[in-house]
């Protein structure tokens, strides 16, 4: 598979493709090859990413980093095929790049790559998109667990989440039979107990929260500003957009001195 095939599969934005074609001509195999193999390995991906950050420190829009990540995504397809993981899982997982770039444009008013600190997980087969949710190999209190992540386009209805979890159990049983786990975890602003005071009982978010026991809260976490309002995290509360019912309620809470924070939940 060529990179352009990957771009087509994940519906990458034409503007980004044009810029990547320029970047491709600027980079040499000798410059980036030492890092690419390590980016595809769960054990070394984080360190390889940090080293590439230093190498590309003058790349303002992080397009060289994006190119490297997408080249790794192209290469990792072979490992998906060797394990006979369905192509749909591969495509859904790698569509994170397109989604993140769209989110970046909405938040900042232009397209660039701001999620390299996260996507090395996808290209090292540490995270998989299965149905509505993403699933990551993690540990909790020394035990293997599966960490759940909620993409911005996820449907959190009970039926959709049940279906995703059912698919995921079959996925890990089939393709990673040696990975033994009993628990799911989720660390997100969507797990914040404060949301129970702002949302109706039949809310999909509340329904999702009820699957977990909250074991830790972080009242100072402000990730919800970016995810809920789709603006930079340091945006003044008075300037937060308030269109949806939840946005209006959260903005009012913040202006009155309240906090949303985040929480870590465990499902047994």
Image: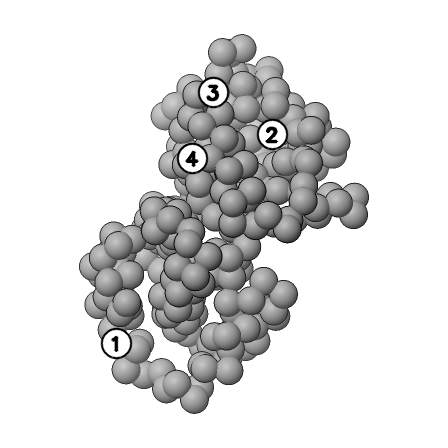
Residue drawn at x 43%, y 89% is: 30
Please identify, in this view, whether the residue under mark 3 or under mark 2 is nearer the observer.
Answer: 3
* Sequence-wise first label, 2 or 1: 1
Q: Which residue is mark 4?
A: 132
Q: Secondary structure at mark 3?
A: helix
In the displayed structure, 115 sits above or below 191; it is below
Which residue has dot 2 on it? 191
Disc with the residue nearer the chain's start (4 vs 2)? 4
Identify which residue, 231 or 203, lies in the foreground: 203
Residue 70 placement (x, y as % from top left): 37, 65
Which of these two is toward me, 245 or 84?
84
First of labels 3, 4 by sequence position: 4
Q: Circle 3: is it few (<14), some (14-19), or many (20+) Cα within 10 Å?
A: some
| Image position, residue 233 (x, y; %) | 52, 45
Question: Element at badge 1?
Answer: helix
Q: Which residue is mark 1?
A: 22
């Amino acid at each position: 598979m060529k990179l352009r095939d990957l771009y087509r599969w994940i519906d990458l934005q034409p503007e980004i493709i044009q810029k990547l074609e320029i970047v491709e001509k600027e980079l040499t195999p000798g410059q980036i090859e030492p890092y690419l193999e390590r980016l595809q390995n769960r054990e070394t991906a984080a360190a390889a990413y940090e080293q590439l950050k230093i190498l590309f420190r003058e790349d303002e829009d992080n397009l060289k980093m994006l190119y490297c990540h997408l080249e790794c995504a192209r290469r990792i397809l072979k490992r998906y095929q060797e394990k006979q993981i369905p192509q749909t899982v591969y495509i859904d997982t790698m569509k994170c790049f397109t989604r993140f770039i769209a989110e970046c444009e909405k938040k900042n008013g232009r397209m660039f790559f701001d999620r390299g600190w996260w996507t090395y997980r996808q290209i090292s087969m540490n995270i998989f998109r299965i149905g509505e949710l993403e699933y990551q190999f993690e540990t909790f209190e020394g035990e293997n667990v599966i960490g759940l992540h909620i993409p911005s386009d996820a449907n959190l209805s009970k039926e959709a989440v049940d279906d995703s979890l059912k698919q995921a159990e079959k996925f890990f049983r089939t393709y990673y039979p040696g990975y033994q786990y009993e628990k799911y975890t989720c660390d997100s602003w969507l797990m914040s107990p404060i949301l129970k005071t702002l949302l109706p009982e039949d809310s999909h978010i509340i329904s999702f929260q009820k699957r977990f026991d909250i074991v830790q809260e972080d009242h100072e976490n402000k990730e919800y500003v970016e995810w809920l309002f789709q603006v930079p995290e340091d945006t003044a509360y008075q300037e937060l957009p308030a269109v949806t019912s939840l946005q209006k309620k959260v903005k009012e809470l913040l202006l009155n001195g309240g906090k949303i924070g985040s929480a870590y939940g465990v499902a047994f």
